[in-house]
Image: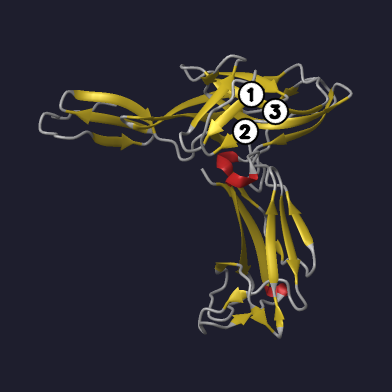
Amino acid sequence: MSISLYAKTLTQSAIQHNGLDAIVFDQSGIVQGAKIVPKRQTVMSGPTDANGAPSFGGVIGAQFVTMTGTLIVTAANGYGVGGPVDRIGSITNASWATLTTNGTMYLYVDINADGSCVTGSTTLMPVEQWAGTQPNTLNQFTFNVQDMIGKVGNGVAAIQTYRVFVGEVTVAAANVTAIVWYALNGTYRSTLGNLTAINTTQRYNNNLGVDPKFQRAQIFITNHTAAYNGYAQWSVYESGCGYTAGSYVVGHMKVETNETRLVTACAQMNWTTYNRPQAGTYNNPANGDHQQYLVVQRTY
């Protein structure tokens, strides 16, 4: 890519970008190159199934896991004069060995300066915190959301590291018994399904792999068979709670690290939707004409 720019007339830095490349100019010319990523500190791309969920492969029953395909990952290191500082890397058919410690082991890749990646694992759950001191505990990865910097303790100090966690395994009797790959770009979306039944808890495996404090869950309803109350067919609207047929409708969601629980309780139907044509009134969608889906996103 060739760029011609007369920068002497600029009084402040200007940012131009073409795809993923961002170039910062000032009066002296090019100041800094950077990378623009859609979501920081995540697996951006990898094999998926028909529903868009990560499907990296791997088999259980051994002391190692080997995925199939290529992962594109990005790790954050705060901010510079050109904006966000991120490193992007890729690895194909990555393998994690010596998965022999009973319990949960967390799989990661470290991104080198040239974009190559090195795999690793730890028994220490990665920690996300808003801000504060990052501990020097040996092999503990701590990510400060406000600063967008991840550090790993070496027993003496916490050192900035371009590390991205991609999944976790359960180990029993020194062999892998289960594999969980984390959602791409910190986002989970369920498939369409019937409205959750009344007085019911429905579980979704969101597999975000982050602290619930940094997750946002939303349930959406779509009228898939016909227009409804002024909404065109296939309209999508966020579900809420309201008062209908003499009963209060209550719905809430409990979010955990890799799971979201949708809990409903009421005397009539489980969810109500806002009736757009008649402000201030609520209506229950008929289950046969409506479906729901859940979206869970990492908030940073």
Q: Reading the chain from its start, which is encountered first: label 1 or label 2?
A: 2
Instruction: Tell me the kind of residue under disc 2.
Output: Val
Residue 17 relative to residue 9: left or right: right
Colouring chosen for the image of the structure? secondary structure
Image point (63%, 28%), residue name: 69
- Picture quarter containing residue 126? top right
**Badge nearest the viewer, 3 or 1:** 1
Task: Give the quadrant of the N terminus.
Answer: top left
Q: Which residue is mark 3?
A: 106
**Badge nearest the viewer, 2 or 3:** 2
Badge 1 vs badge 2, beta-carbon distance below 8 Å: yes
Q: Depth check: 114 or 99 in front?
A: 99
Q: Which residue is mark 2?
A: 127
The image shows residue 159 at horizontal and vertical percentages of: 53, 19
Q: Depth check: 96 or 125 in front?
A: 125
Q: Residue furthest left?
A: 9
The image shows residue 170 at horizontal and vertical percentages of: 80, 31
Q: Which residue is mark 1?
A: 140
Instruction: Tell me the kind of residue under disc 1.
Output: Gln
Image point (70%, 47%), residue name: 256
| Circle 3 residues within 10 Å: few <14, some 14–19, many ≥20 | many
Instruction: Tell me the element at label 2.
Output: strand
Q: Reading the chain from its start, which is encountered first: label 2 or label 3?
A: 3
The image shows residue 275 at horizontal and vertical percentages of: 56, 79
| Circle 1 residues within 10 Å: few <14, some 14–19, many ≥20 | many
